[in-house]
């Protein structure tokens, strides 16, 4: 770049042209080549484990060994996929119900809390908010033992026998999702919700709830995208709670997958297909909504 | 502006359900766990003392060689995991941050591993990180051989070195670098175009631009990424459980040791001690951060 | 100190009882006067007690699952009132399942019956007061007239029997690839460890880099226990668990040295791998030998391999005449929701009919002596014969010889040794572990 002239014409419009280039044409030729080479290299590295999963899942179980993990299947079969689907379909359904409900509930609570902490504060709000945030960071091991006992106590109350498996997970993921959702919404509202509008609403005599439903909620979509994706993914991918709180008959897909992978006579195509089946919903979410996720992060949810 | 109590109460009431839930499920349970960790326990039938009770439970665990080994492993894992995700996250963000064709596609792919659970990823990483070398090479070692890089073959997390746990960070870095990238990308977007422009006009090179103008503004993001990744590392269990099984000495960290204490040794009290120490370790890192952010926010409000 | 004394008395007593070479000193089941459960008095309802019967096992895949399925089918026929609920948990030679079970027991949510390795492993549950004696069931099944006395001895603690055995496995068997041996010119079964390692050198010379295959940690423990039996003999080995053989004795040191040397012939294993990884290496000809329990047979036949033609088996060199035993058994947990249904299950597991159906499918041998051997395939016939005639010792890796907690410490020591290969540390770790649980 001709920097010497650029300095001289600091205010001049023509300089802007250099930044207005079409994507991919910025920098020198060598720079661009290196940049794309690196991007492709990292792309290959990131996709490598997925490659192993996919090729293995289409192989015949009889001739799969770890030493052939990199080679393409000699002949394709979907036996592994069928077997994986057969054993994972019920827990997959349970995971779906569990992760969707937990994501919705934590997002709603997070949105309400975020609104209060950002714009409708009360004395001690900062302290309480900080106490909430600490809940996000605790190692869940530190509460697992009493949690397990407490939930079993609830379950053994008369009429509460149904409270097992994914219902416990819904409660747990909803509650442990509150801190992060609150944080995301609070940061989002702090930038996306101008004080002036709230003041105007107040002048109009709107109470808190009306302000929330008529002003805050309509602009909350980007925040909800982020919290829903985040919560759905973390509830879906959780294994620790599933291990402690559920069993093979009522657990989510991560639990079932671990059983599939830990079996005595491992059927590798089935296991690898199982990994893909169990990850498909979250992969789809990221492929289809990843843009919005990053967009949501960019719209002020991060700081 | 001063608000009247009438205005404040509804805000408190709206948050109250969450306050109650967090109070019970976080703070009450932490208290219960700490209480359990101080128990004196004796086996029911043979009256064998499993835990002496009180703080002696803590000194017993802290003095245990296996626990110290697990703590050291955790340190190695955390340092490599944090450094690795920060490095790749920042590098990818810089690569994709401006003017790349198909940027959205690359971003999504880099973010993709984050969609896969540790337990699922562990299945394939167990293969990839197989320790066999030479003729027995499978997984990454085999790949290295195929690329003519045999001399880099190693036993990964089962290498006979003290620092072998560093290899366990590889799958973790694979999973979370994309997330750190997304955080940094968001940070870059938050920096106005005018600042870059001004720096360029002042004659700054691209490197100087990043070094002196852009990176300093990313430091709050870097700090939160550091905290997020760091605390994830400390509580990491799924991945190690899936890759190394539950009784691997080489791969043991406090979180997996807790599993052994709780179930194989049938000693919930010792497990509670372990969990409490883990909580304290996390708190040492996180609490100052939380206080710092809440203070700095008060300043800006 | 008093507490300790009681511990050691009970533990040593239980172990001594469990390991005594002959059972003459053992009180007969049901002798304990305080114990109201005596034989014929057990009440059962025809068609079953009714209700759900939750049964916890780690038989979730492969031949084990087939065995369980066979039992369940029979259970449904015999006890139509009961509803079987499968609570199986897969993985890790039962390690995952034991974890899950421990959690349920700690939270007072026991299944109606759970699988446990017969022997010392049950001590943990007995010590924690989590399981009930089942002498009544054993007696109703026929007691020592149908179960071998030496097996009942291993299930008896203070005169009470705490589980009903379903099947027996042998853990000191070498599985070998016939073609690989032929190529190396090996025609004879090696007599001892040294002869065996000499054969491994021959195999190595033919280009097979890893004559011996090992897998994750518990398979290493199993290999180590085989070496211990070979170097210490049956009596010396059994003495390790009641204090008569010291863990830092020269014999143990020799065994550690032999084990270390054996590992130099072996592949580089990964801690998390399960046993089929190692067995598959023999099937694929990448290794000549694998020391594995006799459940490996199913892996060979499943991959279409033929006995003698493709593979062969023999007791681990140096352990001929010794049967390294482990048995699965079923318990009656304290506080089970449906003890009546649980007893129906135990009666089925212990019946001749149940044992035949189960063991045919699983590939193990019946715990009962009155199931005709002629109904079983050749390997099982030979194992049944060996169990009758051989010296019996208890497996470490499979919970027959030591409690779960002790086993965990041994596993950690072996896992550590695998990366350090430090003899002295292994011996001192093993000694320390033994001290923790026997003194």
Image: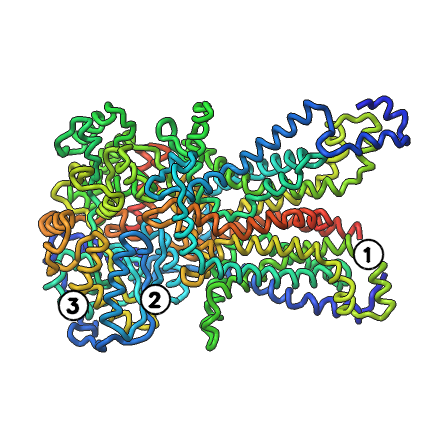
Upstream in sequence: badge 2 or badge 3: 2
Which residue is denoted by mark 2 in the rendering? C85
Seen in the picture, residue C185 relative to A286 is either above or below; the reply is above
- Residue A103 location in percent, x, y? 60, 59
Report crowding for label 1: few under 14, some 14 to 19, many 20 or more residues within 10 A (C-alpha): few
> The residue tagged with tag 3: helix, strand or loop?
helix
Relative to A190, is B96 on the left or the right? left
Relative to B168, is B112 on the left or the right? right
Seen in the picture, residue A242 relative to A287 is either above or below; the reply is below
> The residue tagged with tag 1: helix, strand or loop?
loop
Which residue is denoted by mark 1 in the rendering? A194
- Residue C432 location in percent, x, y? 32, 43
Query: Chain for mark 2?
Result: C
Res B289 seen here? no
Q: Nearer the viewer, residue B68 or A264?
A: A264
Q: Residue at x 60, y 43 (%)?
A: B111
Report crowding for label 3: few under 14, some 14 to 19, many 20 or more residues within 10 A (C-alpha): many
Q: Nearer the viewer, residue B27 or A101?
A: A101
User: Marks 1 and 3, Cα distance to the nearest angstrom?
Assistant: 80 Å
Q: Residue at x 42, y 49 (%)?
A: A81
Query: Chain for mark 3?
Result: C
């Amino acid at each position: 770049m001709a920097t010497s002239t650029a300095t001289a014409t600091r205010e001049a419009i023509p300089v802007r042209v250099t930044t207005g280039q079409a994507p991919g044409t910025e920098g020198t030729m060598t720079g661009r080549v290196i940049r794309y080479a690196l991007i492709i290299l990292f792309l290959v590295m990131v996709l490598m484990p997925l490659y192993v999963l996919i090729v293995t899942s289409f192989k015949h179980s009889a001739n799969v060994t770890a030493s052939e993990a990199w080679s393409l299947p000699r002949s394709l079969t979907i036996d592994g996929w069928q077997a994986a689907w057969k054993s994972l379909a019920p827990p997959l359904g349970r995971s779906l119900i569990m992760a969707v409900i937990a994501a919705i509930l934590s997002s709603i609570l997070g949105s309400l809390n975020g609104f209060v902490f950002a714009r409708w504060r009360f004395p001690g709000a900062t302290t309480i908010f900080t106490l909430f945030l600490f809940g996000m960071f605790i190692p869940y091991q530190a509460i697992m033992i009493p949690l397990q006992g407490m939930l079993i106590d609830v379950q053994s109350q008369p009429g509460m026998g149904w409270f097992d498996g994914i219902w416990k997970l819904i409660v747990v993921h909803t509650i442990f999702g509150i801190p992060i959702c609150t944080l995301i919404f609070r940061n989002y509202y702090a930038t996306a919700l101008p004080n002036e509008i709230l003041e105007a609403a107040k002048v109009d005599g709107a109470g808190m709830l009306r302000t929330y439903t008529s002003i805050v909620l309509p602009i909350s979509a980007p925040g909800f995208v982020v919290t829903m994706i985040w919560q759905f993914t973390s509830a879906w991918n959780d294994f620790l709670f599933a291990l402690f709180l559920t069993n093979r008959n009522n657990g989510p897909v991560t639990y079932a997958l671990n059983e599939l992978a830990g079996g005595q006579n491992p059927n590798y195509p089935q296991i690898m297909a199982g990994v893909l089946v169990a990850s498909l919903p979250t992969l789809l979410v990221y492929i289809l909504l990843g843009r919005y996720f990053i967009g949501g992060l960019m719209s002020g949810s991060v700081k | 502006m001063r608000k009247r109590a009438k205005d404040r109460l509804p805000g408190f009431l709206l948050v109250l359900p969450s306050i109650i839930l967090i109070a019970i499920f976080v703070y009450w349970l932490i208290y219960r766990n700490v209480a359990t960790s101080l128990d004196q326990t004796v086996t029911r039938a043979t009256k064998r003392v499993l835990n002496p009770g009180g703080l002696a439970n803590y000194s017993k665990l802290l003095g245990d060689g296996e626990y110290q080994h697990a703590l050291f492993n955790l340190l190695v894992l955390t340092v490599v995991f944090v450094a690795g995700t920060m490095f790749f996250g920042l590098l990818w963000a810089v690569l994709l941050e401006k003017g790349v064709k198909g940027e959205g596609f690359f971003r999504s792919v880099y973010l993709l591993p984050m969609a896969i659970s540790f337990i699922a990823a562990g299945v394939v990483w167990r293969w990839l990180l197989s320790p066999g070398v030479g003729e027995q090479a499978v997984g990454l070692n085999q790949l290295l051989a195929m690329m003519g890089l045999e001399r880099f073959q190693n036993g990964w997390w089962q290498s006979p070195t003290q620092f072998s746990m560093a290899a366990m960070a590889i799958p973790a870095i694979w999973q979370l670098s994309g997330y750190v990238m997304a955080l940094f990308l968001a940070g870059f977007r938050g920096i106005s175009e005018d600042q870059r422009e001004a720096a360029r006009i002042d004659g700054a090179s691209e490197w100087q631009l990043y070094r002196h103008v852009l990176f300093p503004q990313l430091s709050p993001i870097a700090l939160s990424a550091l905290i997020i990744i760091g605390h994830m590392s400390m509580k990491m269990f799924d991945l190690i459980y899936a890759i190394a099984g539950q009784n691997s000495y080489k791969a043991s960290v406090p979180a997996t040791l807790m599993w052994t204490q709780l179930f194989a040794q049938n000693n919930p009290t010792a497990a509670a001690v372990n969990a409490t120490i883990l909580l304290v370790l996390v708190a040492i890192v996180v609490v100052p951060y939380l206080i710092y952010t809440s203070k700095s926010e008060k300043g800006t409000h | 100190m008093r507490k300790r004394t009681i511990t050691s008395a009970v533990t040593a007593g239980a172990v001594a009882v469990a390991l005594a070479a002959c059972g003459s000193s053992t009180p007969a089941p049901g002798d304990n006067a305080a114990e109201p459960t005596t034989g014929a008095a057990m009440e059962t309802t025809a068609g079953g007690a009714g209700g759900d019967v939750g049964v916890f096992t780690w038989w979730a895949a492969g031949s084990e699952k087939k065995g369980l399925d066979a039992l369940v089918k029979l259970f449904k026929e015999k006890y139509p009132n009961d509803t079987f609920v499968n609570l199986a948990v897969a993985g890790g030679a039962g390690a995952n399942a034991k974890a899950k079970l421990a959690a349920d027991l700690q939270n007072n949510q026991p299944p109606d019956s759970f699988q446990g390795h017969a022997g010392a492993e049950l001590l943990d549950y007995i010590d924690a007061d989590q399981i009930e004696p089942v002498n009544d069931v054993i007696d109703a099944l026929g007691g020592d007239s149908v179960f071998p006395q030496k097996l009942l001895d291993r299930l008896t603690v203070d005169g009470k029997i705490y589980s009903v055995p379903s099947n027996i496995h042998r853990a000191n068997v070498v599985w070998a690839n016939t073609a690989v041996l032929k190529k190396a010119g090996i025609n004879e079964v090696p007599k001892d460890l040294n002869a065996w390692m000499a054969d491994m050198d021959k195999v190595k010379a033919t280009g097979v880099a890893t004559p011996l295959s090992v897998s994750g940690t518990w398979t290493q423990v199993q290999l180590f226990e085989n070496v211990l039996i070979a170097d210490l003999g049956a009596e010396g080995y059994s003495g390790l668990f009641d204090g008569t053989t010291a863990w830092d004795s020269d014999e143990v040191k020799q065994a550690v040295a032999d084990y270390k040397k054996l590992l130099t012939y072996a592949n580089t294993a990964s801690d998390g791998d399960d046993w089929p990884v190692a067995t598959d290496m023999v099937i694929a000809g990448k290794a000549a030998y694998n020391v594995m329990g006799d459940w490996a047979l199913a892996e060979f036949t499943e991959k279409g391999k033929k006995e003698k033609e493709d593979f062969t088996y023999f007791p681990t060199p140096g352990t001929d005449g010794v049967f390294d035993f482990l048995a699965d058994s079923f318990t009656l947990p304290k506080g089970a929701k449906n003890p009546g249904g649980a007893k129906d299950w135990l009666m089925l597991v212990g019946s001749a009919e149940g044992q035949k159906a189960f063991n045919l499918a699983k590939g193990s041998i019946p715990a009962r002596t009155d199931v005709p051997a002629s109904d079983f395939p050749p390997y099982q016939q030979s194992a049944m014969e060996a169990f009758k005639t051989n010296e019996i010792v208890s497996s470490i890796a499979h919970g027959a010889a030591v409690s779960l907690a002790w086993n965990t410490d041994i596993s950690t020591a072996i896992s550590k040794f695998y990366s350090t290969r430090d003899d002295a540390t292994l011996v001192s770790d093993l000694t320390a572990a033994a001290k923790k649980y026997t003194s």
